[in-house]
Amino acid sequence: MVVGDISTGTDVLVIGGGPAGYTAAIRAGQLDLDVTLVEKRDLGGSCLNRGCVPSKALLSGTKLAHEGSHAEEMGIEGELSVDLGAMVDWKDGVVDQLTGGVAQLCDSAGVNVMEGTAFFSGEHEARVMHGGEGEGSEAIEFEHAIVATGSRPIEIPGFSYDDEPVLDSAHALALREPPERLVVVGAGYIGMELSTVFARLGTEVTVVEMLDDVLPGFESRLARPVTKRADGLRVEFHFGQAASEWRYAAAAAEGQAEVNGGSAGDGESGESSAVGDGIVVVTEDEDGETYEYPADAVLVAVGREPVTDTLELGNVGLEPNDDGFLETDDQARTAVEHVFAVGDVAGEPMLAHKGMMEGEVAAEVVAGEPVGLDYQAVPAAVFTDPEIATVGMTEAEAEEAGFSPVVGRFPFRASGRALSVGDAEGFVQIVADDESGFVLGGQIVGPEASELIAEVTLSIEMGARLEDVIATVHTHPTLAEAVREAAANARGKAIHRVNR
Ligand SMILES: Cc1cc2nc3c(=O)[nH]c(=O)nc-3n(C[C@H](O)[C@H](O)[C@H](O)COP(=O)(O)OP(=O)(O)OC[C@H]3O[C@@H](n4cnc5c(N)ncnc54)[C@H](O)[C@@H]3O)c2cc1C
């Protein structure tokens, strides 16, 4: 211990105040444990401040404006304009309200919230470096530690986030003016959600993706309606290309007069690339051919990596795996008995609700409760247009797991509610075991998919059969009826579609 240091002790030290960490801290407080939560930046973590909530706020705002401007069929005329600065202020207000709420909840649960950056200094000791000048540091002794330090955007060679035109998702969500042209590197869920936001704002969006489709990990039949709508917003896609570098267009333009054809999708290497102001993003395909896309900014959204490198894990006897994650058992416990890891730092899927579930379980395990984690029904949602949501097994996964799956489907174009909200693209798909009827999974693309998936999630969690879903009376007219009809279709008895 440094001489003159303050040293405090706590039952549970939570490092990181994102959804996983604050949930662990609040639950531990509710269980009468003495808890200290250390957060170096903002309570709420990436999710509330720079991720889930801000992106969904801007998706909702731009959706309202876009749909309002394209509703002639409903007899609505006129073009709505968006003041992005004002929308960002509104979004920041939503974030402040939620992060303020987290602070209050921590307070009510008796959590001692401490500002600073924590790292391990011994088996049962951490050091917290306070941010402000001259504020120093202090040591904290703990019985148990819960690591919830989250993740950060991956930086790719040639694209430093320190360079102004290179944006990570947090920067993109804070822009007060939409760029005229934006290249998005990566067509995963973050790249696709932010492409949707900016395309709706009138930005010319070009998406480059190394793989051969959008939204890797989701069935292509789910992704298809999303690319179709994105095409309608004039988003350009270039697959099988990796971004290799960018440069200012002025530099590329020296002595050249022609505008590069990259924005039309054919700007191959060697062509002239004078674009006036702005930048040029260079990509390369697997044959080594290069392409150039003019833009005003480039958003790099190629994934996130866990934050474990700043924790001095060796001092507590831990080591991250090759991908930087902390491996845990089904009680969120690491290889060291009294240290837990929750949220993004503990591995995929890097989703807030998965982290919150782990946070709750870790706190309860510390309190001696006989609980464990169950990952069979962890939903995932992509808030594109239309939304995609999945949970449990696909048909192929069910087969691989030894089930004889039966699949039921219901298209939204046969849903009275979907038609009456003017959004009838997509379908609900439900996967069950044919013999027993147990619901194994669900895949939805269409309006409110992120909400509808909760019914399938609950079905899996409760061990419901297709017959239970069919026997449940659903309100009419609602989108949720599509889930019941999909279950009925799996048994050949949907009413509002021809059964096959
Ligand atoms: C643009 C975007 C959109 C997203 N949308 C969704 C969505 O719709 N749904 C969804 O489920 N997920 C979404 N996510 C993912 C979600 O944000 C993460 O899964 C979630 O935030 C993980 O929570 P966490 O608590 O593990 O980590 P984080 O939220 O990253 O929080 C970790 C916290 O730890 C703090 N910290 C780090 N190191 C230290 C240290 N040494 N000392 C003290 N504090 C430290 C950090 O400052 C941070 O506040 C999105 C992410 C992004 C970027």
Image: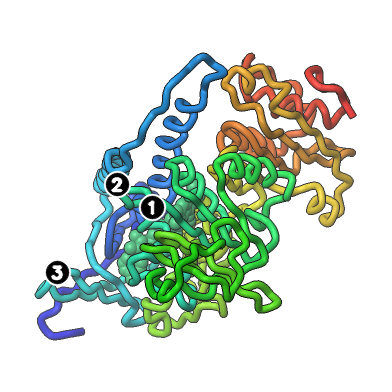
Amino acid marked by disc 1: Pro
Q: Give the number of callouts.
A: 3
Q: Is residue 277 left or right of residue 285?
A: left
Residue 286 visible here:
yes
| Disc 1 to disc 2, C-alpha distance | 29 Å
| Disc 3 to disc 2, C-alpha distance | 21 Å
Residue at image x 51%, y 67%?
Answer: 333
Amino acid marked by disc 2: Thr
Q: Is residue 399 left or right of residue 24?
A: right
Q: Earlier in the sequence, mark 1 or mark 2?
A: 2
Residue at image x 55%, y 65%?
Answer: 347
- Expressed as whole percent of the image width and height from the top left, the position of residue 244 reads 53, 75
The residue singled out by tag 2 in the image is 99
Q: Locate residue 224: give its quadrant.
A: top right
Q: Secondary structure at mark 1?
A: loop
Q: Quadrant of ligand 1?
A: bottom left
Q: Earlier in the sequence, mark 3 or mark 2?
A: 2
| Disc 3 to disc 1, C-alpha distance | 34 Å
Instruction: Give the number of the disc on residue 33.
Output: none
Label 1 environment density (alpha carbons within 10 Å; few <14, some 14–19, many ≥20): many
The residue singled out by tag 3 in the image is 132
Task: Name the residue nearer the viewer: 6 or 207.
Answer: 207
- Expressed as whole percent of the image width and height from the top left, the position of residue 473 reads 68, 17
Amino acid marked by disc 3: Gly
Residue at image x 49%, y 65%?
Answer: 258
> Which image quadrant: the N terminus?
bottom left
Circle 3 or circle 1, nearest the eye = 1
Q: Is residue 333 left or right of residue 400?
A: left
Instruction: Give the number of the disc on residue 179.
Output: 1
Residue 28 visible here:
no
Q: Are marks 3 and 1 in contact (CB under 8 Å)?
A: no
